[in-house]
Image (spheres, rainbow, N blue to C red):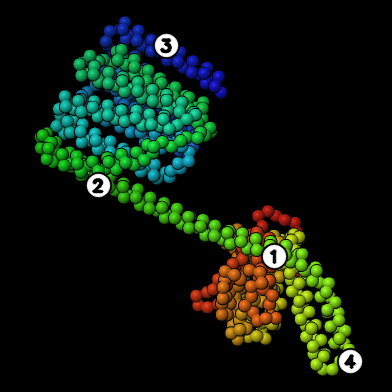
Amino acid sequence: MSGEISLWRNWWVGCSIGLLLLLAALSIMMRSGFGLTVLGDVTALLLLGFATGIMLLNAWQTQGQTRAFWALISAGFVLWFLNQAGWTWIEVVLRRPIPAPFVGDIVLFIHIVPFMAAIAIRPHHPSEEKKLYFSTLNFLMLLLWWVFLYMFIVFPDEYVLLNLPVYSRSWDRLYLVENCLLLLSLGLALASASGAWRRIYRNLFIAAALYTLASEAINASIAKNQYYTGSLYDVPFIACVCWYCWAGLLALRLRPECDPVKATPGRWIGLAPRLAMLAILSLPGMGFWALFFDTAPPQLRQFRLLVTLAAMLALGFFVFIKQYRLDRELIRLLQESQRSYENLERLQSQLVQREKLASLGQLVAGAAHEINNPLAAILGYSELLTSNVSLDTDQLSMARKIGQQARRTRDLVSDLLSFARQAPAEKSLVDLGSLLQRARKMEALQAESKKITIDIKIEPNLPRIWGDVNQLFQVALQIIENAIDALEEVGGGRLEITLGREENELVARFSDTGPGIRDPQRVFDPFYTTKPIGKGTGLGLSATYGVVQDHQGQVTCYNRPEGGAVFVLRLPVVQKPAVALGAAPG
């Protein structure tokens, strides 16, 4: 790539030097006249047209901030080309001298503004993503500010009350300030960039510096009545356009957006908003000067005051729109931060829960097998005792109690082993709606006997999920049984089960009218239970939590303000087609 760029550079430098030497020689040998005018105007017009095409091609082949940068550069060159086209039309086609004042001077003055706006985008900092409307507002505010300066300083002596010496002097000074600010902006961008962008900024800076010098030389010669089109004063101008062309060609070859660089943000990053605020605050000061200290005729003073008032209203409107957009963006960022914080809290809670389950699983796996052997002996001997007819009533009662407690201990150990088992289950496609319907039917008889109504609402055409049908069925049964136990405490009630889709998840909600949950934060902790002794082990919901986590889902619970508890089960839908379909147990 470097060798190819060097070849291109040598070719372009050779052509440019040859063109400049030819123009310099012709300007010396030829007298001022129509032929030299045609040569100077057409050469400048063709070169500016070529430069405009290069910049437009850069904008076409890039994207994002880089495209916005080259689009604004292209806009500046289009204005520059239009000014030169007007100049050429008058001198070459109409064969008239350029009038004073020339309407193209306004276009020439404004063409620098898109260059400044392009540099303000800072495409060499890819991390600084900017919304399109912010870039547009910034450009409009910058354009309005420079239009105001032109209307306030130059325009009154140009069209309100013609005064050619004052107009020329004001235009030259303001244009010099504008070009110097462009050079300052390019210098700051050059200092903060590296890699391909640094090379591009360096060439743009050199071209802008050449133009500033050429423009000042031409303006000085015009003031001394020494300038004519095609003279030696045009050679530096042609040189700057050639250098702009090389900067555009270099960007086409380097493709800086495809080669991101680590640009270090400079200390001047906050300078732009401060300058913008200073510019806005200067409007009342300029109006105050025009009202009390301006020595110009009243007609000019009145015009300047009207221009200041119009600029204040327009800039105030843009500031309001920008602040409104910034407030909206701030609210969006705050909402995203809140969601991120909530997700972080949920992930932290899940991590703590997983650590608890892992620790408990290791403990249970080592102890449960050791407990089972003596427990089996206790159960066997208790059954032998209860079948012995020679025992009296008290002895039989005691033997039955021993058997009951042994069976309870056996069930507890069985739950522990099931809970601690880490082997992955076989998974298939599961119709969660059908599974919930079957779980409801299984618990319906028990619920009716306790004056509990179970309603279920399932959205049609729901997608399947990927999971172990038996484990998920046990999850549904566990949540329903918990709700039935809670409703039994208040003498009955209603359990409503709903199933629907939210984005890429199926969401099942189990909402009851019971007394609620005493401590929702601990309900999934192992051995946590509020049931009477002998009725619950405190492992059902912990096992449920583990199963749901294994299915890449979430299970949460909370209390309703009007009373009752809500369990929310979220499971991801199938993203890719699978081959097997699991059926819920009947």
Q: Position of residue 566 (x, y in %)?
A: 57, 72
Nearer to us: label 4 or label 3: 4
Which amino acid type is marked by label 1? Leu
Cα distance in 3D space between marks 4 and 3: 126 Å
- Would residue 242 be visible to someone looking at this image? yes
* Disc on the earlier residue, 4 or 3: 3
Cα distance in 3D space between marks 4 and 2: 107 Å
Identify which residue, 486 or 257, lies in the foreground: 486
Cα distance in 3D space between marks 1 and 3: 85 Å
- Asked if residue 65 is positioned above or below residue 158 in the image, the reply reads below
Which amino acid type is marked by label 2? Leu
* Within-10-Å neighbours for mark 2: few <14, some 14–19, many 20+: few
Question: Which residue does the image show at 36% across and 24% down from the upper left?
Answer: 208
Secondary structure beneath dot 2 equals helix
The residue beneath circle 4 is: 389
Are the two marked residues, 1 and 2, in contact with CB atoms closer than 8 angstroms? no
* Disc on the earlier residue, 1 or 3: 3
Secondary structure beneath dot 3 equals helix
Cα distance in 3D space between marks 1 and 2: 70 Å
Nearer to us: label 4 or label 2: 4
Cα distance in 3D space between marks 1 and 4: 43 Å
- Asked if residue 429 is positioned above or below residue 558 in the image, the reply reads above
The residue beneath circle 3 is: 18
Is 472 left, or right, of 211 in this rendering? right
The residue beneath circle 2 is: 313
The residue beneath circle 1 is: 360
